[in-house]
Amino acid sequence: ILALRYRVRVSGLEEIAARGTKGVLFLPNHPGLIDPFIILSNLITTFRPKFIADRDQVNRPIIRNLAHHFGVQTIPDVAKYGSESRGEVDAVLDATIDGLKKNENWLLYPSGRIYRKYLEDLGGNSAVEKILEAAPDVRIVLIRTRGVWGSVLSWAGGSQPAVAKALKTAMRSLLLSGIFFAPRREVTVELFEPDDLPRGEGREALNRYLETFYNKDALHNTYVPYTIWESGGAREVPEPLTGRAAGDAIAVPKSVREAVVARLREMTGISQIKDAAHLGRELGLDSLARVDLALWVEQQFGFPAVDAQGLNTVADIMDAATGQSVSVAPVEVKRASARWFEARPLTPVAGDNIAEAFLTQAAATPGKVIIADQTSGERTYRDIITSIFALKSELERIDGKYAGIMLPASVAVNVVYLAAVFAGKIPVMVNWTVGQRNIEHSLGVLGVNAVITSKTVARRIEQQTGSLASIEGRFLYLEDIAGRLGTWTKLCAWVKSRLSWRALRRARVADTAVVLFTSGSESLPKAVPLSHKNILANVCDGLAALEFLPGDRIMGLFPPFHSFGITCNMMLPLAAGIPTAYHPNPTEGAALARLIEEYKTTMVFGTPTFLKGIIRSAREGQLSSLRLAVTGAEKCPESVYEAYAKNYPDMVLVEGYGVTECSPVVSVNDYHRPRPYTIGKVVNSLEYAIIGSETGRPVDTGREGVLLVRGPSIFEGYLNFEGDSPFVEFEGKSWYRTGDIVSEDDEGVLTFRGRLKRFVKIGGEMISLPAIEAVLDPHFASEDDKGPVIAVEATPDEDRPELVLFTTKDTDRETVNKGIRAAGLSPLYQISRVVKLDEIPVLGTGKTNYRALRALLTAPGQ
């Protein structure tokens, strides 16, 4: 079969066999997914080696049966499955060593993965070194395969090879060429048993020796026609763009730099750590060590889902530790169907609640593909309704009126949300980034008895934020629910979705559409109930402000516990009929860029950090379908504006401003006349006022003041909260006091100037400084204290603020952060620096003088 497409020439095989056919470790290069089959077909008769292969690549129809027949040993991809896969990898390596000592033949790919470029790059991979340490006299045979780079089964096309697509292409081309007459790809396989292999000289010398052998006279990207009818013949084509930007650690805070360098010194024993140093080639860190580094970044700095494959240099770690997305090679994605691109006229939002608005859109275009992701694929309105019918009865059994939901941006969270609404429940969106303590409090405030999640999501969250043991008993796993849904239930749901939606139209929908949580103005989050009226009013404001077009499609990346995620990424598609594609991890810039390219999305909503990650990782032209990017949740830095203007001058980047309690959009820039570095004009349905924080009177144009708002998208008050009301009386009316300082110009355009409340934005999340003080105070305060002994402030850096602990006690950063982790706060709350003072400055009232502390942080040398 291979001979129909590949003309393979093998050299050195007979010489190797003449030296003996037992106890050989074969070490091939790995230019594509097809070379294992080429090598196996030549070695199997004489050597019958045991292969070590990637489990995900082997676990395919037919291939898994062949692999089992030939005794292939599979290992998980450590970059994908993290540190939990280390045990399995070590076990297979131990089996390899034992087998070699018993004179068995084994085959191991030193790189652990197929090429990403035309040259082999082993980095700091350690598998061969470990084997040689345990079996120093084992025979080593190197195998060099040339001619595969450029195949559809390689990364030469710029993305992960799609096996199913490649097989279809091959079958079609064979048929068109009369099977036996198809053009053949020239492949050479050379076997060599070196006498000068640097066995005892360390990993660096060994890996560089192997790379030199593999890369000698390496062939560039070569295209070979698939049918005899193609013209041009075999030819060299441009190499794929890598799509990743080098880490830029210039602006990394000093405390982050010190922590990263200290960690790398500890791991490598190398004292001089440079930003440009390659983790593998120069520091000797293998793939498992990079996984450990990724996990350490998550635990120490709180920025989730760092991709180990994206950590190539020290600067990359610096960026990851400050929340900057680290890009990786382009990823394989499922292709969007033609139905995804069908344009239909926009239909006005109609209905008194989200359920009615959704059913109105669904009835108008039941077969319209409206949401999609890489796990669930594309889903039409009718598909969603089928799922609602299947899940509704299961969710109705939940005790109490609330149903917690802990799922990322996805098709699943849309379906579960709607099923909960039609089941008469109030969805409570759980913010898993705030740590176990705050999650437990949030659920307790409302008496939430069940949290719908998945086992995969829960496991990933535990890796990022720590144990969820105290709330695990409330988890209702989607996998378990699916297991309880019998064939009859699914069939009935399918039939109902096509015959009658009467049961859904008659559903008793709660007045509250969703409950979200603040980050806590003092120490714990507050429950924010948003009504259907609140959210739909905000959706309509957004539609009017941003001028949506019939062909628009959204890239959804905001997590659903975020108010922007609910309104802009969920309600817009469901209630307004705008197709949205989802990705669960907003920090994976390369994956998002690839999805934007595939789904041809025209709009994206994201924090500046997320948008920066996308453009840093995107290959040329990948974002060309975007006409609008909307950013909020934190100030957009100049670098993001410049990056998009330079690379996509026809795309409009607008900044807006929102508050959870306001559903959330309060203001947004005009699409036709965007004003960079401002937050635009207040949306149509809201009244607003800007008053002096001390006087309570309106301020003059251009002067700073506190923003007050009132209107249909403003919530009515916190649930089960006994603190001060967020509403104030002004000019005879009740207003929501945002606590944010703004100024207004002559045209009504607002500029954000700061916050009255003691919050800081880190990684797009609101971090409460009083919350940190509340958990640390019991560890430091004593009866002998004559004044405050701790205070937490943030550095004035708007792009990358640091949390600083001022204290009169003797302590250090690690001790402080252990206390924060023990209290159940997420790593985003961790202290970057500890500053020792003789006394904490206080005001005349005896309260901490935070203004004086901020002045210390802005003093020269700080």
Image: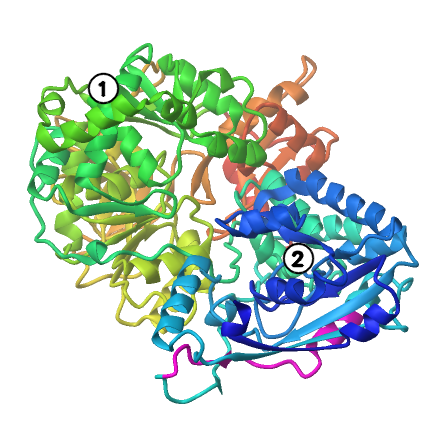
As displayed, is residue 98 above or below residue 393?
A: below
Q: Which residues are magenta?
A: 208-228
Q: Residue furthest bottom?
A: 232
Name the quadrant containing residue 88. Answer: top right
Circle number at residue 854: none
Question: Circle 2: is it few (<14), some (14-19), or many (20+) Cα within 10 Å?
Answer: some
Q: Residue 67: percent from the left, percent from the top?
A: 61, 50
Residue 529 in view, yes or no:
no
- Say what amino acid the circle numbered 2 marks: Gly
Circle 1 is placed at which residue position? 423
As displayed, is residue 93 above or below residue 567?
A: below
Circle 2 is placed at which residue position? 112
Residue 300 in view, yes or no:
yes
Mark 1, mark 2: which one is toward the viewer? 2
Q: Residue at x 59, y 56 (%)?
A: 309
Whether 607 is among the magenta residues is no
Question: Circle 1: is it few (<14), some (14-19), or many (20+) Cα within 10 Å?
Answer: many
Q: Secondary structure at mark 1?
A: loop
Q: Residue at x 64, y 47 (%)?
A: 74
Whether 219 is among the magenta residues is yes
- The answer to whether the residue labelled 1 contacts the one labelled 2, judged by CB atoms less than 8 Å apart, is no
Name the quadrant containing residue 344. Answer: bottom left
Q: Nearer the viewer, residue 363 or 183?
A: 183
Name the quadrant containing residue 676. Answer: bottom left
Q: Residue 686: percent from the left, percent from the top?
A: 15, 39
Would residue 795 appear left or right of 533 to someone viewing this image? right
